[in-house]
């Protein structure tokens, strides 16, 4: 599982009704370039993405669909789950 956000969102709290999300530095631990992010998204089975840039890149790379994006306090949020058949 990976968690990726746009860097300027670190330290912010976003909410939508009863849903509150703290975007903490401890949860998003390092700054990465686009290649590193793309590689991680290809390898991970679960991804939590927050922010305009990271989600737009994910759409550009055709790793998600626009219809899957949710918005919390005007901030786009996307969860990706990859299911594989092991049998």
Image: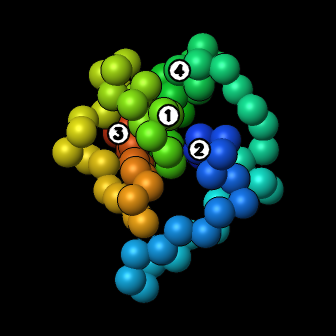
- The residue lying toward the viewer, choosing from 16 and 65, is 16
Provide residue 50's location: percent of width, then percent of height: 50, 48
- The tag on residue 5 is 2
First in sequence: mark 2 vs mark 4: 2
Quadrant location of the C terminus?
top left
Outermost residue toward the bottom in this view: 18
Q: What's the residue at 53%, 20% (across, down)? A: 38
Colour mapping used in the image: rainbow
Q: Secondary structure at mark 1?
A: helix
Of pointers 3 and 2, the one earlier in the residue sequence: 2
Question: Which residue does the image show at 59% across and 41% down from the upper left?
Answer: 6
Is there CB contact under 8 Å for labels 1 and 2? yes
Q: Is residue 70 visible?
A: yes
Q: CA distance from mark 1 to mark 2?
A: 7 Å
The residue singled out by tag 3 in the image is 83
CA distance separating discs 1 and 4: 10 Å
Mark 2: secondary structure: strand
Q: Which mark is residue 38?
A: 4
Query: If you read the primary sequence from the N terminus, does the residue marked by circle 1 or circle 4 appear first?
Result: 4
Mark 4 element type:
helix
Nearer mark to the viewer, of 2 and 4? 2
Numbered mark located on residue 46 in the image? none
Q: CA distance from mark 4 to mark 3?
A: 18 Å
Whole-angstrom CA distance, mark 2 to mark 4, is 13 Å
Whole-percent x and y of residue 44? 53, 33
Task: Please determine whether, in this image, residue 22 is positioned above or below residue 18.
Answer: above
- Which x, y percent locates residue 74? 39, 59
Number of callouts in the render?
Answer: 4
């Amino acid at each position: 599982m990976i968690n990726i956000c746009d860097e300027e969102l670190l330290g912010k709290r976003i909410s939508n009704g009863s849903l509150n999300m703290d975007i903490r530095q401890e949860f998003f631990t390092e700054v990465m370039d686009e290649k590193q992010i793309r590689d991680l998204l290809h390898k991970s089975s679960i991804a939590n993405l927050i922010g305009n840039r990271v989600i737009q890149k994910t759409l550009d790379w055709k790793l998600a669909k626009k219809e899957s994006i949710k918005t919390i306090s005007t901030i786009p949020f996307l969860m990706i789950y990859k299911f594989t058949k092991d049998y």
